[in-house]
Image (spheres, rainbow, N blue to C red):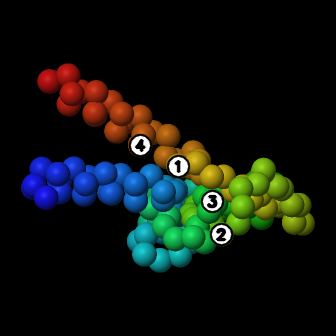
């Protein structure tokens, strides 16, 4: 087999592997650990991109809660074993907990991610136009 054919085969295999995994936003300091709860004001816990591989990771999770009427919003983003499901809100005292699972790449978007995505998009446009 020629080196060109081998390179093409390896490229195709990597695309198949990439396309079968689900990409989700992940709240945590590392994608190697489980997602953690953080708050909208906490800057020490980053939101990272994570490839959710394996047969058990079938959806992306977005879970958030408040502890009162004027509470901060605490959230967790990550991979999930649960099937995709519509948003479900449960009242807990004066606060509430909401869970949402979805099955497309980066569908568990945090509101904090939008500005970062715009900056990345603009940077790509600027770089390609030079």
State the separation of the CA atoms marked 1 and 2: 15 Å
Viewer-proximal residue, 35 or 84?
84
How many labels sit on residues? 4
Image point (82%, 55%), residue name: 88
State the separation of the CA atoms marked 4 and 3: 23 Å
Q: Is residue 64 visible?
A: no
Viewer-proximal residue, 19 or 130?
19
- 54 sits to left or right of 67: left
Image point (40%, 54%), residue name: 16
Q: Split into 4 quadrants, where in the image is the C terminus?
A: top left
Residue receiving disc 3: 59
Q: Name the disc covering residue 81, or none.
A: 2
State the separation of the CA atoms marked 4 and 2: 27 Å
Q: Split into 4 quadrants, where in the image is the N terminus?
A: bottom left
Name the N-terminal-most of marks 3 and 1: 3
Residue receiving disc 4: 116
* Residue at the extreme bottom: 33
Name the N-terminal-most of marks 4 and 2: 2
State the image coordinates of residue 21 (x, y, percent, origin top left).
48, 59
Residue receiving disc 1: 105
Which numbered disc, 4 or 3, marks the residue closer to the eye? Answer: 3
Residues at discs 4 and 3 in contact (Cβ within 8 Å): no
Name the N-terminal-most of marks 4 and 3: 3
Residues at discs 3 and 2 in contact (Cβ within 8 Å): yes
State the image coordinates of residue 105 (x, y, percent, origin top left).
53, 49
State the separation of the CA atoms marked 1 and 4: 16 Å
């Amino acid at each position: 087999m020629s080196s060109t054919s081998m390179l093409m085969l390896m490229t195709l295999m990597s695309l198949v592997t990439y396309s079968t995994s689900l990409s989700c936003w992940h709240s945590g300091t590392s994608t190697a650990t489980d997602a953690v709860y953080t708050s909208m004001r906490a800057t020490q816990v980053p939101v990272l991109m994570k490839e959710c591989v394996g047969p058990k990771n079938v959806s992306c999770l977005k879970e958030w809660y408040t502890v009162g009427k004027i509470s901060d919003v605490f959230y967790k983003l990550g991979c999930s074993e649960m099937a995709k499901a519509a948003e479900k809100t449960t009242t807990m005292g004066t606060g509430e907990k909401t869970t949402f699972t979805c099955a497309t790449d980066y569908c568990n978007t945090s509101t904090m991610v939008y500005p970062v995505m715009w900056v990345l998009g603009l940077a790509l446009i600027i770089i390609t136009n030079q």
